[in-house]
Image (spheres, rainbow, N blue to C red):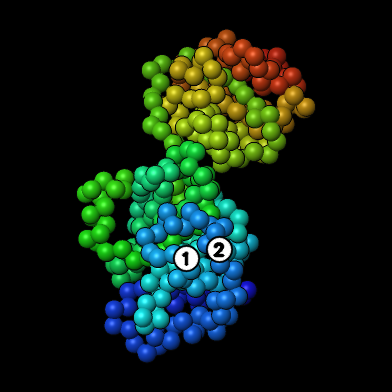
Amino acid sequence: MKKESFLILFLLFFLQLPSLQADAALNESRAKIEAQYGTPDLVENHQKQFAPWQELSDTTALAAAYGYLNAVGESVSSRWLTYDERNCVTKELVLFKQALSVRHFAPTFGKEYDVAAKTSEVFVEQTLRGEQLTAILVQPDGARVQLRFLPQGYETKPNMHTRLIGFEASRISEDELQRKLSQRIWRKTDNFFQEKLYFSETLKKRKRTDMIVIHHTAIEGMSVADIQQLHLSNGWAGIGYHKVILPDGMVQDGRPLEMVGAHALGANLHSVGIVVVGDFEQRRPSETQLISLLQITRQMMHRYKITPENVRPHREATAGTSCPGAQFPWTEFRTRLNAMP
C-alpha cells in the first residue's frame, strides 16, 4: 500500500469529521476512499477476533462499519470507517496486526494524530476490565478529536509501555468533554506518548542519602527505555536506578535523583543507584564506561558527602546477588576512586 494513499485517507477523515454542511466533494468521500483502497469486502470481518471492540465504542456492531487494509511504515492495520447518511466519515477504528506500545505510537501515527503535542491531553477511564487511555487532540480550527485506545491487557496501570491493539477516533464536543470531567468519568494523567520517563505511581523523596550502590544490567545493549520497560513489567513504578551508563560511556538520567530508588533491597531508602549497561559476569566494563562511572560516582560522593567505604557493589548492599558481576574490577575501581580529588 502506497504511503500517499494512506495520507489521502487521513486527510479525507479530518476534512469530513467537522462537516455539518457537507458540500458535493465531501459527499463523494466514500467513493474516493474505495478508489484508493478497494471495496470494503476485501477486508475480513474482524468482529470475532477483536471482540474487545464492543468495549471500546458505543456505536453499533463492527459489522456496520466498512474495513480497509493499509500500512504506516512497518505497522500493518485494518481501518473500519463508519459513514453517515451523506457518506461522510463519523468514526474510525484502527486495529493493528501486531500490538504497538504507547511509546511507539507517536513515531508511527504522529503525522496524522499528534498525541505528543503540547496541546494534547491524556486521560484515564476506569472500565470493567481495567484502566484505559484516551487522548484529546486539538485541531487547528479548535475542534477536538478523541482517541480511545484499546490495550492488549489490563495487568498494570497505563504507562508509556502499555501495549495497544488499536484505537478509535471520533469528534468530541466541549460539552461532552466537560461532562466526562465533571462526572469524573475521566481522570487526567501524564502524556505518556511524549518522549519522557513516566512512572506508574507517585514516587517518594529520600529523607537521607549516605550510600551509593553500583550495579550492572546483566543484559547487553540496554537503553534507559529498555530498563524502564523491564522494571515496569516487574510491577515497579518504573526504572529503579538513578543514573545509567550506556555502552559508549554516556551517562543518562533514570529515576529522579532525589527520589527513593528500586535497585537494592534493604538500601533503597538511603542510597543512590548507578547501573552500568553490560553483563559483567562475562566480561569487564569498557574503559570508557569505567571512567564515566568514576566521574559520576565522585560527583555523587561530593554532593551527598558520602565516604568511600559507603560506595558499595550491589552484592554488599543486598544478599543473594553477585551484581555487578564477577568480572567487574571492583578492587581496581575502588583504588582509582580513592585516588580522585
Q: CA distance from mark 2 to mark 1?
A: 8 Å
In terms of image quadrants, where is residue 309?
top right
Q: Which residue is mark 1?
A: 62
**In x, y percent, where is residue 23?**
34, 87
Foreground: 339 or 107? 107
**In x, y percent, where is residue 244?**
58, 33
Amino acid on which the number 2 mark rests in the picture: His
- Please say if 204 is above or below 161: above
Quadrant where the N terminus sits is: bottom right
Secondary structure under badge 1?
A: helix
| Residue at 55% in and 12% down | 310
Q: Which residue is mark 2?
A: 46
| Contact? badges 2 and 1 (CB < 8 Å) | yes
| Residue at 59% in and 40% down | 226
Amino acid on which the number 1 mark rests in the picture: Leu
| Residue at 31% in and 45% down | 187
Q: Is residue 93 at all visible to an observer of this figure? A: yes
Quadrant where the C terminus sits is: top right
